[in-house]
Image: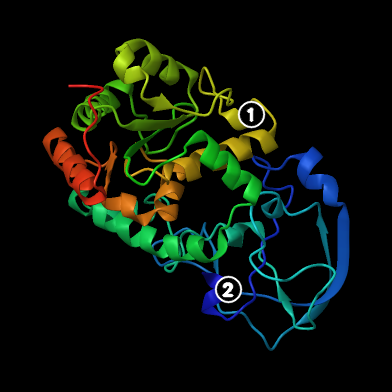
Amino acid sequence: IYAEMYNLLPWIFLSREVNQIWDEDVHGAGGKHSFLADVIEAPELYDERDENREKPFPGVPDFQRTRKEEVTVFGNGIWNSYFEPVSDFSFDHRCSKPMLTLAKPLVSHWVAPWAVESYPGYLAWEHILNSEYHQWYGQQRRIAHEIVRKYFHPKPWIQKLVDKVNPTKENSICLGLHHRGSDKSGKRRKTHFEQYATFIEAYAQETGGGKIFLATDSAPFLKEIEDKFPPEVAILFHTQENAIRSSNKLNPFSIGSHHRTNTEVMIDMYALAKCDIFLHGRSAVSEAVHYINPKLHDHSVDFEDPTYMSEDAFREMIRIIMREKGVERRRHLR
């Protein structure tokens, strides 16, 4: 967004500081790169609601003031391991124009008036009424989708794995279900099996046995799905086999290889985005799914939205989607 605002050539290169996703064995393989560049800066600005000036964001770049600086980066930038490049910039083919780099505090500029928020941050939370949550999220997701559509293009090997775990057909219907059960914190609440169960049963009945794709970081939640539903419902679930999942509050990034967890999370996001209906709580993963597939905004149930739809409304939504897609009810369930 910032690059487009000021006609800058975008380039994404993430460093070791992004320690939750950095994998030394994979992302450090590119070695060290250093080059001399004309560097320009952006002033630090603050939202008027940020009374303590804790969250800066970048202002208008000062193209008139440059300084010579040796820019040093290490590794492959993480991004290029999973996505196609967002531009043709490379270390081997650098242009003579000045370069603007953003320090970590400025990259986390979700408080900027023009930025996308994945959930209401501390500056916005108190200003949004319960009745406005769906509308507020819709505005954020529309902006984010345009950026994702332009720049977020998974590597072919990622897309191949997505299609393998969630193959979909034109005349079929799919329910996506995301549950985050490990280290969820802040004002976001953990969702529970009982919240999902009623809607899952309604979906199974209305579709007669439509596919369900489940993504979760919680081994106990997956066990509940397997144990508490009757076999004719449990058989409808598809998920990534042998994915790293937590049995407690420890998140998967703290358990296994970061490259592996990065890959598994990406597969889950894009597999969920292939679905027609979405059940979820609030998390970065669930928001990313909406950014990929904007149709899910009006075809989803967010269990942390105080005004989420009723079971009857959910059933009617399923019937409408099935009619629009020409999907006939299966006879697997009655």
Look at mark 1 in the image and give the residue it sits on: 254
How packed is label 1: few (under 14 Cα within 10 Å), some, or many (20 or more)?
few
Q: Residue furthest left?
A: 312
Look at 70% across and 31% down and name the residue there. 257
Q: Quadrant of residue 173?
A: top left
User: How far apart are labels 1 and 2 at the CA level?
Assistant: 33 Å
Q: Amino acid at mark 1?
A: Ser
**Residue 229: percent from the left, percent from the top?**
31, 15
How packed is label 2: few (under 14 Cα within 10 Å), some, or many (20 or more)?
few
Taking depth in this image into account, of 120 and 197 the one nearest to the observer is 197
> Circles 1 and 2: CB distance less than 8 Å?
no
Query: Is residue 224 placed above or below 302 in the rendered structure?
Result: above
Q: Quadrant of residue 67?
A: bottom right
Look at mark 2 in the image and give the residue it sits on: 3
Under circle 1, the secondary element is helix
Quarter that holds the C terminus: top left
Q: Amino acid at mark 2?
A: Ala
Look at 69% across and 89% down and name the residue there. 64
**N-term-proximal mark, 1 vs 2:** 2
Taking depth in this image into account, of 58 and 53 the one nearest to the observer is 58
Can the viewer see residue 257?
A: yes
**Residue 135: percent from the left, percent from the top?**
25, 57
Q: Name the side, left or right, on which 231 lies relative to 38.
A: left
Look at 61% across and 45% down and name the residue there. 158
Q: Quadrant of residue 61?
A: bottom right
Can the viewer see residue 309?
A: no
**Residue 123: percent from the left, percent from the top?**
38, 56
Under circle 2, the secondary element is helix
